[in-house]
Image (spheres, grey):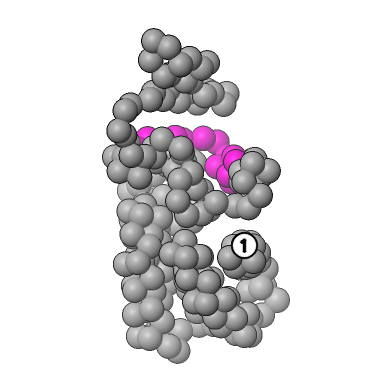
Amino acid sequence: YRQLRPNPYAVVALEDIHIHVCGIDGFIPADSYASVIIAVPDPDTLYHSFAARLRETYGKLPVAGIPRILRPRKRYGTVRGFTVIDPGGNWLRVYKLGDSEEDAAAEKAEGLAQIILVAARLGDAHGDEALALKTLDNGLARFAEAAAIERVKAYLYRAELAVRLNNPELARSSLTAATALELTDDEQRMVADEMKHAIELVQQV
């Protein structure tokens, strides 16, 4: 549904998800505090559907500015999910139906793996990419001897954050650092999606 008079108003719907938006004079989407949690049976499939349509519309995957989409990722103390910031600045946080915050909070991680989770919470849940990047850099320095797969994951997320912060040089150097580390065949399969995502983003800048 869409109308311009007597007041700007629209409704967008996807199956059981209905979002109502309105036009407000002087409103700045980047300053919005609006946030909603959406629980769906298969968030990964929904993410890929959203991402494909955004690529069609914008010619790339928008991960900075408004609108933007952030890939599914586990974050410290909360369940895995992805986020869409729509044209009105509304944060749509999509999680798997039935996932428990309590179970997620009880999961343990150590060292660089823990740092990545904290950085993801800062960057993806709070929208503070600069602090997330600083957290990752500190973690990479502190845990320089961490397992190669953990360092690869950290560098790949670092590359994404650099793209979001409009720092192409850092994005490329982070991706180079990730690809330079040796992984087993199983480990390569484990990070294949993250690697593909980071390569796509770096090629966009």
Magenta residue span: 35-50
Residue 197: percent from the left, percent from the top? 61, 61
Give the residue drawn at x 38%, y 15%: 7
Residue 45 is one of the magenta-drawn residues: yes
| Residue 32 placement: quadrant | top left
- Check the picture and name the quadrant holding the C terminus: bottom right
Relative to 150, is 37 on the left or the right?
A: left
Which three-letter amino acid code belongs to the residue tagged 1?
A: Gln
Q: Position of residue 160 (x, y in %)?
A: 51, 65
Q: Choose top left, top right, bottom left or bottom right for residue 203.
A: bottom right
In the displayed structure image, the side of residue 150 where residue 55 appears, left or right: right
The residue lying at 43 percent from left, 64 percent from top is 165
Of 83 and 151, nearer the camera is 83
Give the residue at the far right of this rendering: 185
**84 on left or right of 100:** right
Q: Is residue 34 visible?
A: yes
Q: Is mark 1 on a helix, strand or loop?
A: helix
Q: At which x and y percent is residue 134?
A: 34, 74
Q: Residue at x 50, y 65 (%)?
A: 163
Q: Could you say which is closer to the camera, residue 115 or residue 205?
A: 205
- Would residue 153 be seen by someone viewing this image from the given angle? no
Above or below, 198 against 96 in this view is below
- Residue 94 in the image, given as x and y percentages of width and height: 47, 41
Tell which of 42 and 133 is nearer to you: 133
Q: Which residue is label 1 attached to?
A: 204
